Amino acid sequence: MTHAALLAAAAAQAPRMRAQLAELVEQESFSSDLPALHSCADLVAELGAQALGSAPRRLELGGRPHLLWPGSGDGDVLVLGHFDTVWPTGTLAGWPFTVDGDLATGPGVFDMKAGIVQMFAALRLLPSAEGVAVLLTGDEEIGAPSSRKLIEDTARGCRAVLVPEPSAAGALKTARKGIGTYRLDVRGRAAHAGLEPEKGINATVEVAHQVLRIAALGDSTVGTSVTPTVLSGGSSMNTVPEQASVQVDVRAWTAAELARVDTVLRELEPVVAGAALELDGGVNRYALEASHSADLFTAAAQEARALGLAPLRGVAVGGGSDGNFTAGLGVPTLDGLGAVGDHAHAPGEYADLSAMPQRAALMAALVGRLLGTG
C-alpha cells in the first residue's frame, strides 16, 4: 500500500475511531477499581479481536486483568499500552465524554484511551498482524506492580517496542526520566516531653536532618531531582517521637545517576545518638535514554514525511511509562505515539480527533517498515 493509500484508508476509519473512543471512555477503568478494570478489559479485548482477528490471552495477576496478543516469536514488534486511568469511578457522571468540533474530552480520553483506539486502527491497516505482539495492562498508572515482569518477559527478544502513550503537544517522547521511590523510616525512643525528654531519642529531629541530606542529593546540572515528599512522625503533643518517616521521589535521565542516588541513600547514617534508620524501596523504572529511541525516531520521522505529515518532533519528559521497563532491557523503544491533545491527569484532558487517522497511519507505516512489509 502506498503512503497516500495508507493515509486515505486511515481517514476512512475516522467514524469508527470516534465511536470506539466514546465507548471506551464511557467504560471507566480506575486503577483501584478491579471490577471496572475487568469490565474495561472485556471491551478492549472485543475491540482488539475485531482489529486483529483473534482474542487475546487474558492474564490475571494480583487480581488485575492484562491482555496479550502474542507475536510470532523473536524479532516481534511489541505495541505496549495500558487501559487503566487515574480517574476514580464516578468521575464520568460529572464529566461525560463530549465532542466539541475536533476535540474530545472525558476521563482517560488522552491518557490513553485514544491511543488504544489509534493502535487498533493502525494494526487493522496492515496486510497482516504477523510479527506484531500487543500487550495492554491494567496497572500502569500505579507503577505496574503486577505487570512489570510480564512486560519485560514479553519485550525480551523483540526488535522494537512502540508505545501509544499520549504525545507531548504532538511530539514523540524520545527520552523519559528514570524513577526511584523510597521510604526512610526512623526509629527513636519515646519519653515524656515535659518530665524527662532527655531519656528520649527524637525521631522527628533525626528525620529533619535526613530530609536536608536527601534534598541535597539532587543535581540540577544533569537534571536529577531528589524530592522528599510525604513526611510523618510522632504520636502525641507531649511525647518525644519514637518514630518518623519520609518518602522520597527520585528522577534522573541516566541509570548512572539513579545508581548514584540509590547508593548514597543506602549509606545514610543517623545524626541523633541512638536513632536507627531503615530504607525501603529502590529504582522503579530505569530511564528511557535518548539512545534507546534514536533509530526508531529517525524511522518514524521519515515515514511521517512520506505520509505528507508535519515534521515530527521529539522531546524528553520527566514522567515515566511502561516503555521505561523495555528500554531498561536494552530493547529499542519509542514512546508518545498516541493521541495528540493535552492535560493528562488533569480536568479537561482532551484528544484531537482530527489527528487520530494521521497517527494511526504513522504507526501502521512504522510497523510495516520495521517488519519489512511497508
Image (tube, grey):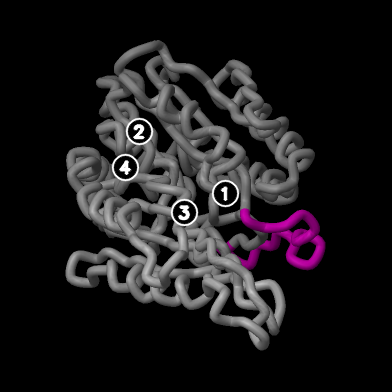
The residue that appears at 66% across and 26% down in the rendered structure is 60
Mark linked to residue 161: 2
Mark 2, Cα crowd under 10 Å, few <14 / some 14-19 / many 20+, is many
User: Label 3's element?
Assistant: strand
Q: Is 288 rendered above or below residue 72?
A: below
Rounded to the nearest angstrom, the CA distance separating label 3 from label 1 is 24 Å
Instruction: Report whether residue 328 is seen.
Output: yes
Q: Position of residue 50 (x, y in %)?
A: 62, 25
What is the C-alpha distance between the residues marked 2 and 3?
Answer: 37 Å
Quarter residue 241 falls in: bottom right
Chain part drawn in magenta: 86-103
First of labels 4, 1 by sequence position: 1
Q: Which residue is mark 1?
A: 142
Q: Tell me the quarter of the picture where residue 190 sits.
A: bottom right
Earlier sequence position, callout 3 versus callout 1: 1
The residue shown at (53%, 21%) is: 69
- Badge 2 marks a residue whose secondary structure is strand
